[in-house]
Amino acid sequence: MLHLDRLWHKADYSPEAKQWFIQQQRDFMAAHDNWIIDGNYGGTMPLRLAEADLVLWLQVNRVQAIIRVVRRSLRYHWDKASRPDMAAGFTEHWNRDYWNFLAFVWHYDDKKWQKVLAQRPAGTRLVVLRGKRAKRTFMDRFPNSGE
């Protein structure tokens, strides 16, 4: 499994880092017959969609999304081990960037992403999961989900 947050947040966010980020994803997909990549990162979504055979889209309402982001941030502040998907040494700051991220989450445009996902190659399956129950039901039926 490749966690995009682990990659991106160990970079310096420069234009060179963006190219490195793209190459890391390409290398990961080329090195694995079967792979899971966790993360949104719209700038590299087409790259991943072109290679995916299954896309899971987890949807929650905006209030729930904000609550989860803040809860995750607080938990990570108190216990770095709570986010094994995050880059080592990453420190989250409650600064303008964080508030901009919360605004991004609040204004997340499902219709925009539906258009992006609609451009996936023919045969790429899209499963939209709304809420914990749908996620749990899917995972109970997904092969090898316990491994």
Image: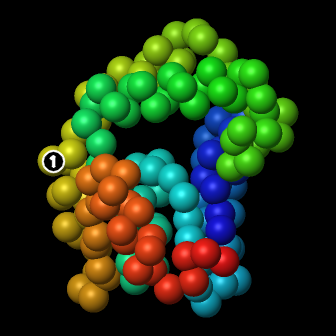
Rendered-image quadrant of the N terminus: bottom right
Residue 126 coordinates in the image, percent (x, y) = 28, 72
- In depth, the one of 84 and 108 nearer the eye is 84
- The disc labelled 1 sits on which kind of residue? Lys
- In depth, the one of 65 and 24 nearer the eye is 65
Instruction: Please tell me in which quadrant of the rendered image residue 145 appears.
Output: bottom right
Residue 140 coordinates in the image, percent (x, y) = 44, 74
Residue 131 coordinates in the image, percent (x, y) = 31, 50
Q: Please indicate whether residue 46 sits to the left or right of residue 18 in the image.
A: left
Residue at 57% of width from left, 83% of height from top?
144
Q: Please indicate whether residue 109 sits to the left or right of residue 43 in the image.
A: left
Q: How many marks?
A: 1
Q: Outermost residue, top direction?
A: 95
Q: Which residue is mark 1?
A: 111
Q: Could you say whether the residue bearing mark 1 is in a helix, strand or loop?
A: helix
Q: Please indicate whether residue 5 sits to the left or right of residue 89 in the image.
A: left
Compared with 9, 100 (above or below) is: above
Q: Is residue 60 at all visible to an observer of this figure?
A: yes
Residue at 60% of width from left, 25% of height from top?
73
Residue at 41% of width from left, 63% of height from top?
136
Instruction: Please tell me in which quadrant of the rendered image residue 106 appears.
Output: top left
Compared with 3, 110 (above or below) is: above
- In depth, the one of 3 and 74 nearer the eye is 74
Q: Please indicate whether residue 53 sits to the left or right of residue 87 in the image.
A: left
